[in-house]
Image: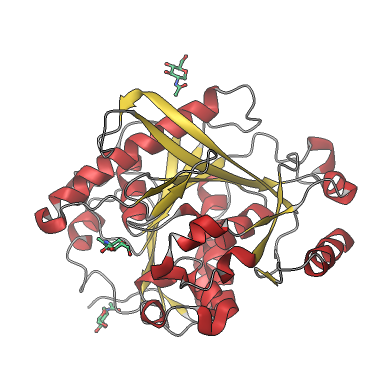
Amino acid sequence: MLFYTTWSFLAVTSGSLCTQLPKLAGQYPVGTVSFELNDESRIDPLAPTPQPRALMVSIFYPTSKFAVHSGNYPLSRYMSSQTAAALPQYLGTSGDAARVLTGSYIDSPPITNSEDEDDDSGSPVLIFSHGLNSSRLLHTAHLEQLASRGWTVVAVDHTYDAAAVEFPDGRVVPWRPTNLDDFPNELAGLIAVRVADIEFVAQALGNSSEVPFRLDRVGIFGHSLGGATAAQVLANSDPRFVCGANFDGGIFGPVAKAGFDKPFVQMEAAGHNRSTEPSWPEFWDHLGGFRREFTVKGTLHSAFSDLPVLRDLLGDAFPSAEKEQLGSMAGERLLEIDTAFMHAFFTFCLKDGSSSDLDRLAQGMFPEVTIPQYT
Ligand SMILES: *[C@@H]1O[C@H](CO)[C@@H](O)[C@H](O)[C@H]1NC(C)=O
Ligand SMILES: *[C@@H]1O[C@H](CO)[C@@H](O)[C@H](O)[C@H]1NC(C)=O
Ligand SMILES: *[C@@H]1O[C@H](CO)[C@@H](O)[C@H](O)[C@H]1NC(C)=O
């Protein structure tokens, strides 16, 4: 992939941008766009003053090799310096995260059918939901890897329960402290807002003539509270949402007791399982469709994000308190594992793949991943 090398070279010689996320491992180069979506039908229940709910969205998608070769599209930076400065708890205060380059080309056009050997026209879309007090941007490395395997992935920031959301006009909306003393009812309330965010984004993108992706069959996945959000989205009756995955999130809200019948996968941190997580046993018993749980050795709860990759890239600039939330597994290995499992699972439930391709991953290819055996 000559174009890739050329761009990295230009990036290095252009000065301060000197570190890049792990190379895209899939067969497609990736394009990305970010934009604001306003839900005029909803007054934002989390905003300090009455206003429509405003959301930031990023999309990662397989892009045209011809367009990338043309050299007209720059690689996207991991995040702006403003956003990096608003996330010191995750990224420290060096500002180094803003100097990291992703592997995704800004505004590069989506791949055309004639260019795509697999002819994935009308390929289903995946929507990703971040954890409480986190950010969609802290999953960029993961989502661009999935896009390079042929997926169009939409990531949504849940304004006010995200740590910081930067809008195109430059304003950065901070985390709004929530009264978590009322746990878990408060979380159930946040999930209701998040579910409405996801449903709105799916509708708005599906309605827009400018969006060249189909949103009639959607996979939904997320980390932590985002995983609980995915579960609740699947439990609601909207048939567009076909299947989903939860990265290590406790389950709150009505879905915790009601479950659903759609395919669902849980990726779990070491020691976090149905014996130790109080919200999982009842939820699991009410999943009536295909379901799998996998445990990833050497991980803690926050490992299911880009933070391990950033820890490995940023070295001493990465905050030591956050290091303690991640576990020992190398960032690049986690990226491979998470991408392989999501690719296999969503291929099974959205592209008529075989579930044995998913099960095989935990039986050899990734010895760090096991299926918990309860006695
Ligand atoms: C969210 O992050 C902010 C900033 O680091 C911190 O002050 C706050 O305690 C966090 N809240 C929760 C619930 O984690
Ligand atoms: C999408 O279109 C449907 C049908 O016209 C309409 O009911 C819905 O409000 C639209 N939603 C958004 C978010 O644009
Ligand atoms: C669940 O986690 C606990 C705590 O680490 C561990 O002792 C137990 O063996 C785990 N259960 C399974 C089925 O893996």
| Location of residue 238 in the rendering, given as x and y in whole percent from the top left corner | 37, 31
| Location of residue 63 in the rendering, given as x and y in whole percent from the top left corner | 75, 46
Quarter of the rendered image showing ligand 1: bottom left
- For residue 125, above or below residue 132: above
| Location of residue 283 in the rendering, given as x and y in whole percent from the top left corner | 22, 55
Q: How many marks?
A: 0
| Location of residue 128 in the rendering, given as x and y in whole percent from the top left corner | 47, 49
- For residue 246, above or below residue 64: below
Indicate the quadrant where residue 273 lies.
bottom left
Please state which of residues 14 and 305 is positioned toward the viewer in this rendering. 14
The residue under the point 70% across, 35% down is 121
Please state which of residues 298 and 135 is positioned toward the viewer in this rendering. 135
Which coloring applies here? Answer: secondary structure
The residue under the point 87% across, 45% down is 66
- For residue 200, above or below residue 116: above
Indicate the quadrant where residue 2 lies.
bottom right
- Is 127 on the left or on the right of 80, as rendered? left
- Is 314 on the left or on the right of 221, as rendered? right
Q: Looking at the image, which residue sits at the far left?
A: 182
